[in-house]
Amino acid sequence: MFAFIIRRALQAIGVLFAVGIISFAMFRFAGDPVNQIVSLDTPAAEREQVRRSLGLDDPVPLQFVRYLSKAAQGDFGVSYQFRQPVADLLAERMPATLELALCATVFATGFGVLMGVYSGLKRDSFLAKVFQTVSLVGISLPTFLIGILLIYLFSVTLGWLPSYGRGDTVQIGWWSTGLLTLSGLKALIMPSITLGLFQMTLIMRIVRAEMLEVLRTDYIKFARARGLTTRAIHFGHALKNTLVPVITIVGLQFGSVIAFAIITETVFQWPGMGLLFVQAVQNVDIPIMAAYLMLVALIFVAINLAVDILYTIVDPRLRTSIRQPA
Amino acid sequence: MTQPVLSVRDLRVEFVTRRGILKAIDGISFDIAKGEVLGVVGESGAGKSVTGSAVIGLIDPPGRIAGGEVLLSGLRIDNLPPEEMRRVRGKRIGMIFQDPLTSLNPLYRVSEQLIETIRTHTNLSASAARKRAIDLLAEVGIPAPDKRIDSYPHEFSGGMRQRVVIALALCAEPELIIADEPTTALDVSVQAQIIALLKRLGREHGTAIMLVTHDMGVIAETADRVAVMYAGRIAEIGPVRDVVQNPLHPYAKGLMGAIPSLESDTDRLVQIPGSMPRLSAIPPGCAFNPRCPYVFDRCRVERPEPVQHSEHRVACHLYDQSSVRSEAVA
Amino acid sequence: MAEAIQAAPVPQSQPTTWAGRFLDSDIWASFKRSKLTMAAAFLTFLFMAAAVLAGLAPQDPFDPAQLDLLNSRLPPLWDAEGQAPFLLGTDEQGRDIFSAILYGLRISLAVGFLGVAFSATLGIALGLIAGYVGGTADAIIMRVADVQLTFPAILIALLVDGVVKSVLGGQLDGVTTLSVLVFSIGLSFWVQYARTVRGSVMVEKNKDYIAAAKLIGLPAPVIMFRHVLPNVLGPVLVIATINLALAIITEATLSFLGTGMPETMPSLGTLIRIGNNYLFSGEWWIIAFPGVALALLVLAINLLGDWLRDALNPKLR
């Protein structure tokens, strides 16, 4: 099993390296690093000076290594727009995004699994058909439309929930949380639902499909032939076998959720990394774009690795090496 | 004479599809006595597995039992409500399937699966159930059962897994075991062991066994009687020795002639021309008539009913007194 | 003594023409059975017709000459203050919402189809190469695929979009933006095609008919295209239908975020972004109708895709 984990870790590093190359390429060639320090109307001579001081005339591989080592220390350069270190900007915004992503995932997983299991067990019931329709709608409506719809309903018409921002947050050390205040919680509701809806329908569909697949297997047939109770078959055997692959998917989806937060944060003006990224794309603020890419890659890769390890714990087939048959 | 463990009377199973109703089994009747092994043999699609599923009540829609009766020790079971049928399954009828790897839930230990089954059908406590589970494993021939019982299914070899499956089927001491191709997925060397195990268990516990397979060799080794199925009907049924050495039904003749033997010195194996008809295109009259070398007019029109002919029951007009042709065809 | 074997007559009830076989097939039967799918197909057809015929709309809303500020902010026709010919009302510049939707549909569908075409072509080509040639080519392509798969398509589309725009510099016109969008979206979705095709190719590669083709001496590309590709198109079709809906949503999202189609040549997403500014001031129609149009379009495509997937899935028959 160790070999498996080491292999996955190496793959992870490989991915990070590849992303690093792309990030660096963007940083160095798509934008002009000189713009981090000077403005557009600085005279040419001064620009030349800045170029040399930034080491932009050195061989490219050297610059790459320098970029990576700086990144490892948390230095991603300076934003063109805000004239602040990108790392600071990202750190400031990260709790907002992570909290939102977490709430969305909890919402999506909870409801998704429940609805999926029900639809799998009671295929032809009315409620299952309702869930099917909801899932179709969830997948068809673009995230931003859902957000706008919710805002129109609950903010404009009913006035129950705020239409933008995080509400009041509490600072705990480096982290700022909205979970401890009423306005913070209220502000979390619509964005979480918006962000989570797509994932919820995905999870529901996968759980349902997996459930139906499992119910067709030989071991379920054999369980029925042994006269096990329906409850034992459905919730003891089928459910457990269904949820194992679903765990992987939920874990992997978390990374996706963080990326999708870009849209939700834009609709709700949520002060997270996603909104920062969109503004960067709009204003061609390359350092932020490059840094965001690397950060997201790191989170993704870390999650993938964690999920792989989790999988080996949960599925006994992956745990043991091949033993001698008795 | 004591009552048979299993009695099937004129059973009919059909599948409702868009293109019409397909008759998977069209009126079969047979008995299995206590401790007896009945082999059910035939080509793929003849209806052997469907028969097993019908007896144990696991025909799922779009299939359904369309007629006939299934009696277990004299009591009808084909029309039981689902919850009662569930109690019969496992406790009074056990069933094992072809592939031992996919028959066991890979996420649960063998001990958990055994104990669960035992406690479903008996009132034993957890520790008593565990003891019984270990005894069962010993009985099916798993070495060091007290140590191996906590292993996962994938940690056993194919033959051992099938033994575990048999142990699971025996948990509640059923009166009848249906074995659906139990050795097809196993190595030849292991097949013999599993067959021997089944025979021994049948004899020691008095369990009736319905052995479904397409392998005539296995039947010849193991069964007391054999039923030859064709296109959802029983062509011939009788003591295994008689049917193998002196088959009456032309299809059975073809089958036995197709078995390679170390003793005889033939150049070519006998082949039955043509192939078994699809369920949607079963010919009128006798289902075998397009391929039968002895066919005559009545065969194409009227379906033959089983008639007793010495030890066998045959469904063929050749053996029916009222047919025009004489029986002197051998 | 055996009689001659009598062959049973073959019933002549199966149709033998292409059209006949299609109408008799399971696919058509399942299509007819599902009213929902037929409705979805009808709706999709309607949308596509509308897009093609957009030129017949009452107004070309993005030709400034046709706009009159006196017509601005009119509610839909059925409202007391509505005015003909503005069926669904106008926005703050006097643009007819109905016409804008038709033109927007055109752009949305164009980007969607072109994006899928690009993804599919790229993905199938790379998948064929990876599967058939194998070796280093396979390893490289699959590594790239794995890296790309770690990120959701929207992120990749945004990135590519941002970088290309930065490289091209300055304000881009409508057609260039459209091309950049097609490129970004196409680039973010090729992986699924490549993986599926590669898998199928690796299965087919070992089959006898390929060995036979090689024996005759057919060159590899010919074998790949003429023999392997047709067998692999089934799953590709399923992916393409899912992909189309996603491509349309991705383009709409990019436009909504301000990084997609500009207001001079808007897609449905752009219209929604414009309309969002008026949501709070009560002029709901500016965002509502384009929103509904987009939702219905994607819903119809998804339904069709669902049906196609179930119909083509041998396991569910």
Image (cartoon, coloured by chain):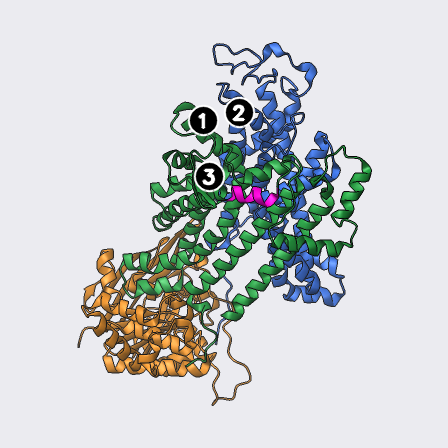
Badges 3 and 1, same chain:
yes
The residue that label 3 is drawn on is: A138
Residue C287 marker = 2
> Which secondary structure is most common in the magenta stretch?
helix
Residue flagged by tag 2: what amino acid is it? Answer: Ile
Residue B224 appears anywhere in the view: no
Chain in blue on the image:
C
Which chain is depicted orange? B
- Give the extent of the magenta segment: A85-94
Q: CA distance from mark 3 to mark 1?
A: 18 Å
Which chain contains the residue that carries disc 3?
A
Rendering colour (chain A): green
Residue designated by label 1 = A152
Indicate the secondary structure of the residue bearing disc 2: helix
Furthest toward the right, the residue is A45
Q: Give left or right: position of B293 versus C102.
A: left
User: Residue at position x 48%, y 18% from top?
Assistant: C282
